Amino acid sequence: MPFVIADPCIDVTDKSCMEECPVDCIYEGARKLYINPFECIDCGACEPACPVEAITEDRHVAEGSEAFVDDSAAFFTIVLPGRDSALGEYPGGAQGVGAVPADTEMVTNFARQE
């Protein structure tokens, strides 16, 4: 998985990164955006566009955010709440899918620590 979006994106979802992605592989969940690791071409265009610095290469995620690497893939491979099936590894681009009104369990239950 080339790039991953971690917890600074939760409840922010600015979407600037989506505008920069040349392959339309950044999908919108209920609380967070997710980069599809199967569609991402590792170009890095999304990283500088993120105003909260939530996007990094998977091998450089901040300490304590490592779980977001697997969680990002899970968004596409598990059946999310309210859906009958998983989005799949190649759902055809975020614009065609539209906003998904669900998140992974990890993001749904995420509580920011003050």
Image (cartoon, grey):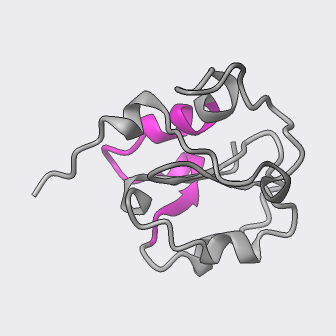
Q: Residue at horizontal 61%, vertical 78%?
A: 16
Q: Is residue 21 left or right of residue 74?
A: right
Quarter holding residue 98: bottom right
Residue 42 colored in magenta in the image: no
As drawn, the residue found furthest toward the left would be 114
* Number of numbered discs on residues: 0
Q: Is residue 75 above or below residue 17?
A: above
- Residue at x-position 44% and y-position 52%: 31
- Comparing 6 with 58, the one in front is 6
Q: Quadrant of the C terminus?
A: bottom left
Can residue 16 be seen here?
yes
Q: Quadrant of the N terminus?
A: top right
Q: From the top left corner, tell me how far across and down residue 101 is, in percent.
A: 55, 44
Residue 45 visible, this orientation: no
Task: Tell which of 89 and 85 is nearer to you.
Answer: 85
Q: Residue at x 49, y 33 (%)?
A: 104
- Work out whether residue 42 or residue 5 is closer to the camera in this orientation and state it: 5
| The quarter of the displayed image where residue 82 is located | top right
Note whether 81 is above or below 35 in the view shown.
above
- Give, as a single range, the part of the protein colored magenta: 53-73
Measured as percent of width and height from the top left, residue 88 is found at 79, 29
Residue 43 relative to residue 14: left or right = right
Q: Horizontally, is 99 left or right of 63 in the view?
A: right
Q: Position of residue 61 (x, y in %)?
A: 46, 51
